[in-house]
Image (tube, rainbow, N blue to C red):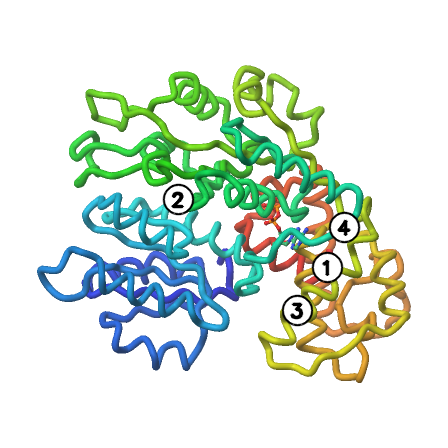
């Protein structure tokens, strides 16, 4: 199972559709519940808050304006811990998909869906959400010289149309930078759409990005908009571009060079009107290796490069980030305000934070939930001691501790082999990126 902790809610009046989705998703996610009527929503939310909601937009027979779905979307987004919402649109309705994205949906899928694409969309939504509610909307915190430089670059490139490439390890805040560029640009009122390029199945790459016409291949039962069309007028964030196969890179290059895309089966190309921001955690040696990444595509994407340094290289930001996320989770979990003990601050500032700000955020969430003393202690943050420091003489370890240690070692080995690339490591371990992030959080890696 890819993510046993995830709770997925399907809201679709078509019982067959909901059942098919349930069958598919039950094999991968811990809990999958389907509802056929929005009136059942309140009770379902009271029972367990979902991580991801798959939301159909029309419930009353004959209605196709999507207003019912948009109302549910607004309700879900207003929850204290809003789930990620993936819009299910039956009519390849681009304006509706765009409206849903503007109101906070994380993605949209056109019915009938491609199974791999649906799973990839849920995985991405879980990874982005990181199990931590609205925290993704945090502003870019920090006042270190490195972050001040990043903010200054954002301010100067945002008003231009230049393509920006954001580089940095996993969890340093590349997507936050991309969003900040969008929000400071003249496109701010339009859509910001993030696409995990590493998760797009190769077989449906073109249809996902550029769309397709009804009948262009066996399963193309309806016209379908691609990501380029859905983000029209706004910004398209191409995340994890370092994980794209070379064949897909060639297709993307052609679209960017011509500034137009041709949906599969269409006889005319459509002009592109998107600002491209891309990101990768590949180090620059690998990025400049032509066997990994096409130099001509790199040249298209990296007009401006913004490097976000790892947290261990800007430790002065750690106290601000700790306070920010502790405050956020205290409010979210309705826990009392507490300060950090001196020992905790000292050790947290010295911690290497290989998972960067994402790991710090998870650690803060844990401390808020588990901390039981008047001040937060280092131990509340659940950061695992390095493997070598684990005492060897424990007489009869409990089986789950042994399993935990084995899991941690396997993750560490996979990360090492994948040179820190989360997507590659997840593939080596046979789990989704979302699941791996959760495990990294669990083990404090
Ligand atoms: N400077 C920052 N201030 C506040 N929150 C931050 C900062 N940097 C990162 N975060 C938080 O850390 C988490 C990870 O950030 P983000 O998704 O932008 O990282 P990323 O570099 O795109 O990661 P990945 O490469 O794994 O996709 C998010 O919850 C984000 O809000």
Q: Real-space Cα distance between discs 4 and 3?
A: 22 Å
Which tag, 2 or 1, sits closer to the chain's start? 2
198 relative position to 372: left or right: left
- Whether residue 403 is visible: no
Q: Real-space Cα distance between discs 3 and 2?
A: 32 Å
- At x 87%, y 56%, the residue is 350
Position in image of residue 378 (x %, y %): 83, 70
- At x 49%, y 73%, the residue is 80
219 relative position to 288: left or right: left
Q: Real-space Cα distance between discs 1 and 3?
A: 12 Å
Q: Residues within 10 Å of mark 1 (few under 14, many from 20)?
A: some
Residue hosting label 3: 365
Residue hosting label 4: 143
Which tag, 4 or 3, sits closer to the chain's start? 4
Circles 2 and 4: CB distance less than 8 Å?
no
298 relative position to 223: left or right: right
When the figure is inspected, residue 121 is found, relative to residue 332, above or below; the finding is above
Position in image of residue 336 (x %, y %): 69, 83
| Disc ID at residue 190 | 2
| Disc ID at residue 321 | 1
Q: Residues within 10 Å of mark 2 (few under 14, many from 20)?
A: some
- Whether residue 176 is visible: yes
When the figure is inspected, residue 235 is found, relative to residue 253, above or below; the finding is below
Which tag, 1 or 3, sits closer to the chain's start? 1
- Report how many numbered discs are placed on residues in the image: 4
When the figure is inspected, residue 356 is found, relative to residue 78, above or below; the finding is above
């Amino acid at each position: 199972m890819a993510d046993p902790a995830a709770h997925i809610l399907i809201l679709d009046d078509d019982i067959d559709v909901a059942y098919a989705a349930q069958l598919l998703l039950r094999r991968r996610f811990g809990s999958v519940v389907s509802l056929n009527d929005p009136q059942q929503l309140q009770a379902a939310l009271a029972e367990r808050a979902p991580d991801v909601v798959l939301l159909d937009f029309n419930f009353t027979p004959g209605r196709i304006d999507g207003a019912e779905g948009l109302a549910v979307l607004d309700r879900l987004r207003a929850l204290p811990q809003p789930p990620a919402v993936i819009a299910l649109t039956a009519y390849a309705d681009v304006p509706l998909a765009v409206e849903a994205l503007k109101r906070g949906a994380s993605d949209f899928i056109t019915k009938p869906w491609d199974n791999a694409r649906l799973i990839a969309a849920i995985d991405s939504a879980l990874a982005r959400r990181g199990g931590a509610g609205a925290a993704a909307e945090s502003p870019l915190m920090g006042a270190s010289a490195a972050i001040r430089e990043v903010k200054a670059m954002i301010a100067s490139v945002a008003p231009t149309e230049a393509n920006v490439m954001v580089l940095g390890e996993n969890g340093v805040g590349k997507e936050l930078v991309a969003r900040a560029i969008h929000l400071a640009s003249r496109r701010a009122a339009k859509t910001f759409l993030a696409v995990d390029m590493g998760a797009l199945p190769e077989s449906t790459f073109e249809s996902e990005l550029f769309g397709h016409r009804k009948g262009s291949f066996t399963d193309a039962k309806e016209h379908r908009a691609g990501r380029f069309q859905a983000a029209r007028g706004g910004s398209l964030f191409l995340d994890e571009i370092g994980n794209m196969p070379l064949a897909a890179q060639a297709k993307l290059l052609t679209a960017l060079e011509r500034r137009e895309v041709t949906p599969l089966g269409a006889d005319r190309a459509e002009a592109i009107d998107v600002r491209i921001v891309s990101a990768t955690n590949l180090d620059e040696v690998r990025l400049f290796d032509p066997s990994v990444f096409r130099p001509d595509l790199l040249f298209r994407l990296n007009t401006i490069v913004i490097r976000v340094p790892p947290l261990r290289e800007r430790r002065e930001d750690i106290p601000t980030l700790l306070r920010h996320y502790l405050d956020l989770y205290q409010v979210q979990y309705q826990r009392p305000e507490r300060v950090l003990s001196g020992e905790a601050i000292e050790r947290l500032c010295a911690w290497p934070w290989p998972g960067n700000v994402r790991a710090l955020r998870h650690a803060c969430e844990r401390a808020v939930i588990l901390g039981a003393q008047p001040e937060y202690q280092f131990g509340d943050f659940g950061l695992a001691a390095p493997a070598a420091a684990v005492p060897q003489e424990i007489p009869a370890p409990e089986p789950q501790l042994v399993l935990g240690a084995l899991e941690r070692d396997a993750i560490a080995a996979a990360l090492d082999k994948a040179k820190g690339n989360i997507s590659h490591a997840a593939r080596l371990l046979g789990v989704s990126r979302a699941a791996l992030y959760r495990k990294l959080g669990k083990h404090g890696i």
